[in-house]
């Protein structure tokens, strides 16, 4: 449970920055700079300002800004200028990506291949654009590829029990740590305050599935907002009331190595098999009653 809370704390609030182009197949994962939540694979431009160098030429002359300076490319691409000095995005060479320095920087693709870093993954995927292989290739989860056990029906039924409890306790943790009003909005805090102050709230811990099921039945109202809140955190690229594979990735990727039913759970949530999970499908997956599904709670 503590590991689960750590991962979502890294992803909470508005930290899920929007892709820098339409990127239907990209995902955002834990980056080298978790404070700003920059996606791994995007290398910040290092600008040497030369503040201690002696000026040369006409002091009043201002050098023109490089066309690529504020031109953003999606994951796996870098900016270059064409013959007319116009910026354009081209695929980054995997060999230009910095090597990984730790095991946690490695990622596993849906091709069951371990990539040194997500920079290597997205650069490789970019080179496959327009091909069948490239269309099917996604970043599956964080860490080296390993054997993920099959998810059996009984285990699948237990997954939403733990997930609901986790979401509720993540929100409570954010509420308790929100000193500068930057973790939750005022509307969100008002909702979470009621949960936090409820004496019947089940404290965070490793609980049996029986206890989790009993608590959901007895304190059902405490779980309605956390389920809606998580949907809103993921529905960002764009905000359209549907979760794509890309939008689910920040939640899926860290969980798969720990919860082997993650992939199957989200697949079963897509009731109409259209590759998107609507709010109604999402809430239903977590046991929220139809009458309690409210888009106004996605705040």
Image (spheres, grey):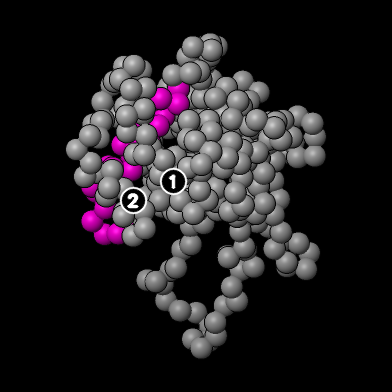
Choose between 64 and 142: the one closer to the eye.
142
**Farthest left residue in view:** 199
Label total for image:
2
In the image, residue 137 lies at what x, y percent?
68, 31
Q: Quadrant of the N terminus?
A: top left
Give the structural element (helix, strand or loop) at label 1: helix
Magenta-span inclusion, residue 91: no
Q: CA distance from mark 1 to mark 2?
A: 10 Å
Residue 143 in the image: x percent, y percent? Answer: 48, 26
Q: Residue at x 61, y 38 (%)?
A: 277
Q: In the rendered image, is residue 235 in sight? A: yes
Mark 1, Cα crowd under 10 Å, few <14 / some 14-19 / many 20+, is some
Quick check: 203 left or right of 49? Answer: left
The one nearer the camera, 139 or 258, is: 258
In the picture, the quarter occupied by the C terminus is bottom left
Task: Tell me residue 171's x, y (percent).
Answer: 33, 43
- Where in the figure is residue 86, as x and y percent of width and height? 73, 66
What residue does disc 1 label?
229
Residue 46 position (above or below residue 147) = below
The image shows residue 171, relative to residue 296, as above or below, that is: above
* SS under mark 2: helix
Principal SS element in the magenta part? helix
**Which span is picked out in magenta?**
159-182
Residue at image mark 2: 191
Pick the residue in front: 8 or 192. 192
Whether the magenta-drawn stretch holds residue 167 is answered as yes
Q: Could you tell me which residue is drawn at 71 percent across and 59 percent down?
A: 88
Q: Nearer the viewer, residue 292 or 152?
A: 292
Q: Residue at x 67, y 51 (%)?
A: 22
- Which quadrant of the structure image shows residue 265? top right
State if disc 2 and disc 1 touch (CB < 8 Å): yes
Residue at x 64% of width, y 68% of height: 67
């Amino acid at each position: 449970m503590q590991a689960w809370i750590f991962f979502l704390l890294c992803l909470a609030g508005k930290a899920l920055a929007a892709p820098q182009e339409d990127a239907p197949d990209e995902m955002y994962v834990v980056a080298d700079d978790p404070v700003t939540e920059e996606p791994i694979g995007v290398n910040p431009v290092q600008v040497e300002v030369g503040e201690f160098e002696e000026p040369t030429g006409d002091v009043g002359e201002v050098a023109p800004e490089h066309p690529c300076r504020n031109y953003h490319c999606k994951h796996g691409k870098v900016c270059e200028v064409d013959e007319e000095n116009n910026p354009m995005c081209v695929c980054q060479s995997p060999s230009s990506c910095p090597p990984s320095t730790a095991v946690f920087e490695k990622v596993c693709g849906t091709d069951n291949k371990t990539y040194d870093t997500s920079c290597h993954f997205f650069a490789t995927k970019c080179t496959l654009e327009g091909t069948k292989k490239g269309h099917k290739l996604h970043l599956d989860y964080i860490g080296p590829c390993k054997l993920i056990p099959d998810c059996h029906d009984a285990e699948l039924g237990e997954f939403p029990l733990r997930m609901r409890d986790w979401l509720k306790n993540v929100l409570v943790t954010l509420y308790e740590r929100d000193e500068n009003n930057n973790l939750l909005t005022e509307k969100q805090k008002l909702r979470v305050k009621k949960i936090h102050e409820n004496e019947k709230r089940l404290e965070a811990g490793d609980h049996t599935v029986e206890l989790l099921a009993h608590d959901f039945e007895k304190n059902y109202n405490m779980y309605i907002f956390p389920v809606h809140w998580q949907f809103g955190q993921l529905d960002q690229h764009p905000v359209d009331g549907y979760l794509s594979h890309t939008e689910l990735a920040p939640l899926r990727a860290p969980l798969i190595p720990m919860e082997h039913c993650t992939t199957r759970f989200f697949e079963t949530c897509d009731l109409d098999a259209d590759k998107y999970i609507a709010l109604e499908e999402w809430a239903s997956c977590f046991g929220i009653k139809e009458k309690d599904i409210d888009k106004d709670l996605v705040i």
